[in-house]
Image: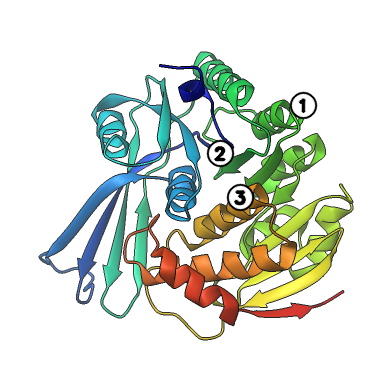
């Protein structure tokens, strides 16, 4: 390998503390209490961080996933990403990687059954941090750290905050997608962008909408807050102002992973230096493309590009 081959360009570094193998069942109509045949089954490496990394890659940018993997399911996860997925740094864990099942009906109704992740021992948490530190040290300027999903049982509520501090020390932007005390600790540590959904915002500060956004920004005036609200789109507030971004029409499909697509679009926009208005349109368009794709973590790039210019953008302040 020559010197030029070793150069790492900017990338979205996505940390997966609670990854999963996602199983998607597509059926006509789910009938509770009845035995049903499943004509279409899809299994793939998944979890929120993985979905973000996949969509970043599908948007044409580099993604690097760090995932704690263990057991046969962990081996299946790694094998799936080896066939064209984002770059993977696997951290060995004694915990068996979990599985999730999403049942998608023909009318677009999606029912998700998510196994709970196992507790992470302190030694394995340290191994994850060591791997993250190595990846951050090798990353180029303009890279973005993405922290998605709740912390696994046993992890300190300041776990994400430690990751934020490590990335900010090197000048990287950090996007955090979670709620509760872990989100507040990440904000206090210097997160630049956060993307709770409406329910996580309410859980974290006791109110939603612009009141909830303002409560978070009081902790860090430079913070950019994006709140996803399903079909209603996004509310965004930051130093440059406040906006609501809404899709131009209702979209029917699989909403699982739509929020992850928002995060992927924001990460991609930051790496490309896009203005906030363009990032918001891209985020809602990419989210819509995710809904229209039956498999979480996948989009059609052209669909996302077509939807973005149709997004309604209203300046709130």
Q: Which residue is mark 3?
A: 267
Tell me which colouring the rendered structure shows. rainbow
- Compared across the picture, whether 201 is left or right of 283 comes to right
Residue 185, image quadrant: top right
For disc 1, the neighbor class at 10 Å (few under 14, some 14 to 19, many from 20) is: few
Q: Which residue is mark 1?
A: 169
Q: Position of residue 101 (x, y in %)?
A: 30, 53
User: SS class of the residue under badge 3?
Assistant: helix
Residue at left 57%, top 57%? 265
Nearest the camera: 182 or 3?
Answer: 3
User: SS class of the residue under badge 2?
Assistant: loop
Badge nearest the viewer, 2 or 3: 2
- The correct choice, above or below, for 314 with respect to 167 in the image is below
Give the quadrant of the C terminus.
bottom right
- Compared across the picture, whether 300 is left or right of 164 comes to left
User: SS class of the residue under badge 1?
Assistant: loop
Cα–Cα span, label 3 and label 1: 18 Å
Q: Are marks 3 and 1 in contact (CB under 8 Å)?
A: no
Residue 255 can be seen in this image: no
In the image, farthest residue toward the top: 123
Q: Which mark is residue 11?
A: 2
Sequence-wise, which precedes: disc 2 or disc 3?
2
Residue at left 43%, top 63%? 301
- Compared across the picture, whether 211 is left or right of 121 comes to right
- The correct choice, above or below, for 186 with respect to 6 in the image is below
Q: Position of residue 134 (x, y in %)?
A: 57, 18
For disc 2, the neighbor class at 10 Å (few under 14, some 14 to 19, many from 20) is: many
Residue at left 53%, top 20%? 131
Cα–Cα span, label 1 and label 2: 17 Å
Give the quadrant of the N terminus.
top left
Q: Position of residue 190 (x, y in %)?
A: 79, 38
């Amino acid at each position: 390998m020559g010197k030029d081959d070793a150069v790492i360009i900017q990338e979205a570094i996505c940390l997966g503390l609670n990854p999963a193998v996602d199983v998607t069942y597509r059926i006509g109509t789910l009938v509770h209490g009845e035995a049903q045949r499943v004509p279409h089954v899809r299994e793939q490496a998944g979890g929120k961080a993985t979905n973000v990394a996949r969509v970043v890659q599908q948007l044409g940018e580099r993604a690097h996933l760090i995932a704690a993997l263990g057991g046969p399911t962990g081996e299946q996860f790694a094998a799936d990403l080896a066939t064209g997925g984002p770059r993977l740094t696997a951290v060995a864990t004694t915990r068996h990687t979990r599985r999730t099942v999403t049942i998608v009906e023909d009318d677009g109704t999606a029912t998700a059954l998510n196994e709970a992740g196992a507790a992470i021992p302190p030694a394995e948490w340290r191994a994850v941090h060591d791997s993250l530190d190595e990846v951050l040290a090798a990353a180029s300027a303009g890279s973005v750290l993405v922290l998605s999903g709740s912390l696994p049982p046993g992890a300190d509520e300041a776990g994400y905050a430690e990751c934020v501090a490590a990335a900010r020390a090197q000048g990287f932007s950090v996007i955090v997608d979670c709620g509760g005390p872990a989100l507040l600790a990440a904000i206090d540590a210097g997160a630049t962008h956060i993307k709770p959904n409406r329910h996580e915002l309410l859980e974290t500060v006791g109110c939603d909408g612009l009141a909830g956004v303002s409560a978070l920004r009081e902790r860090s005036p430079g913070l950019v807050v994006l709140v996803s609200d399903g079909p209603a789109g996004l509310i965004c507030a930051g130093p440059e102002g406040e906006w609501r971004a809404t899709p131009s029409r209702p979209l029917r499909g699989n909403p699982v992973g739509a929020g992850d697509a928002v995060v992927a679009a924001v990460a991609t926009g930051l790496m490309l230096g896009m203005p906030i208005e363009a990032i918001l349109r891209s985020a809602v368009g990419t989210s819509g493309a995710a809904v229209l794709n039956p498999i979480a973590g996948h989009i059609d790039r052209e669909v996302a590009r077509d939807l973005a210019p149709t997004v309604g953008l209203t300046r709130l302040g």
